[in-house]
Amino acid sequence: MSTAAIRSSPWPARAVGAVSIVALFALLEALIRTGVVNRFVVPLPSQVLAAIPRVIAEENVAQRFWQTTQEVLWAALFLALAGIVLGALLYRFRLLRLACETWVGALAAAPVVLMYPLFLVIFGRSAATIIAIGFAAGLPAVILKTVEGLAGTRQVLIDVGRSLKLTSGQQFRKILLPAALPTIFVGFRLGLIFAMINIVGVEFLINFGGLGQLINEMAERYDLPATYAAICFVVLVSVLFFDVTERVERWMRRIV
Amino acid sequence: MDAAHRLTVATPASTAHRVLALRVAIVTSILVAWEALSASGLLFRDVVPSLGAIGRALVRLLGTPEFYSHLSTSAGEVGAGLAIGAALGLAAGILLGANRFAADAYEALIHYLGPTPKIIFFPVMIMWFGVGAGSKVAMAAVSCFFPIAISAAAGMRGIDRVLIRVGRSFRAGTWQMVSKIYLPAMRAPVLNGLRLGLGVAIIGTLLAETKLSNRGVGHLIIQAYATFDMPRMYALLTVVFVIAIGLNALIGYAGRRAR
């Protein structure tokens, strides 16, 4: 089901979905209160809900959120610069593309995030490690989609550029790049999602940075409601991020 | 053979040769640059070890029975997690693909939870399944559930309605419909989902092992980091990358053959 189809789902179905999730949490609350589920393993959903304002107020969530956002923005900048340049190079030099495109595809399937101990040695336990992992994880998607977008430019547009005697730089700026922009943005969005997933993941693993570290700290304190609340908060941020980038992508497709 | 025919035959072959030559040149350049960087002393000692040191570490690693014991632990955790995640993902995908109301009610949940970082659920998995293999299996299952469910739902919706009507006209039961109609008809998207699912299951399991474990390849990687044994870390990462990319290519090939 496409995102558009999900958005246009009829409201009774959506309501049933929402009500059944609330019912599930109510059942869980009852099971924990009656002792069927151990409250030292799964906290009461009401406790988790109550812990959210406490976590937000006491754990500098706004600052952590900003720190993770900054890391994502830096990774996004590097992704846009390197990914689009490398993609354009592969498009421009056909032989290079034939030689390297499968390698880039293989890199997209590689578990790059497992290299985080290596990045820790190179960059230290700092934001640079987190940004580098995010960048490395998102790069193949941006390169591949840039090549796809440029290669998919309609021949008639390229011929128009040639008939106007555009230089190769003008051809790229005025014809190829605008035509490929929607596809490039699809790749950029994918790369950004991979980057964000890996950035939060590495923050959690190395106990450094923003939102990922928050979960680790709560878990190490064995503050169960706060741990669950922090996880819910990070999931919510991820969902919002995914939704916003999706909306931007649709808006871009409309205007280009 | 006329000139035109010679041209059509010769061009792809010469392109293939040029591509091969370029690939060899790129790989050689990277290896030479690596060796030069290693010898230059620009980075901290051993951050970029020599290729010889990495090669020796790789040979030592592959010749140690202990490595295969850790590898089999990780493979077992990934395999078990994939089996659980795939079974649940397939069931959820078939249900959502077959039932429009269920899809309208619940598919958004899977669609939006799919791209969240799964490793953040690891503290919960530890509380639920302990610090042993159980929490790693759970990580693999949670990681691979989403891509498999999404692919299966899409595959289910893409099944030719005629096939479904044929199954119903033969009065096939639910299990017969699943095994004889649905799964064979949606094998390509399911294999694609499994390919994606396997990749994230490997990542989920090994990351969990790096965080908290005394077994598995992830544990070996973080141990190599803790003891600053960089050649061993590069060797381990090489093995993991080769296995992950190889398995991905293998399932991708099976998926293309299934179309």
Image: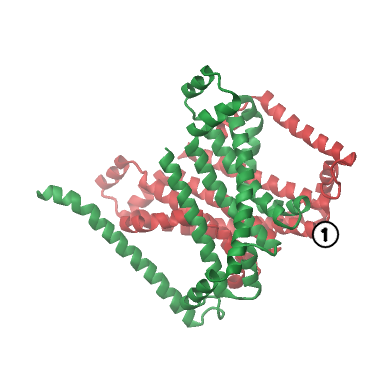
As drawn, B99 above or below A34: above
Q: Quadrant of residue B150?
A: top right
Quadrant for the C terminus of chain A in the image = top left
As drawn, B161 above or below A59: above
Residue at 42% from the left image edge and 42% from the top image edge: B256
Q: Residue furthest top?
A: B169
State the hue of chain A: red
State the hue of chain B: green
Left or right of B195 in this view: B72: right
Residue at 62% from the left image edge and 35% from the top image edge: B91
Amino acid under disc 1: Arg
Q: Which residue is mark 1?
A: A221
Q: Residues within 10 Å of mark 1 (few under 14, many from 20)?
A: few
Quadrant for the N terminus of chain A in the image = top right
Q: Position of residue B38 (x, y in %)?
A: 48, 79
Nearer the observer, A1 or B58:
B58
Q: Is residue A2 visible?
A: no
Q: Residue furthest right?
A: A34
Nearer the observer, A180 or A49:
A49
Nearer the observer, B15 or A229:
B15
Q: Position of residue B77 (x, y in %)?
A: 64, 54
Q: Quadrant of residue A155?
A: top left
Q: Secondary structure at mark 1?
A: loop
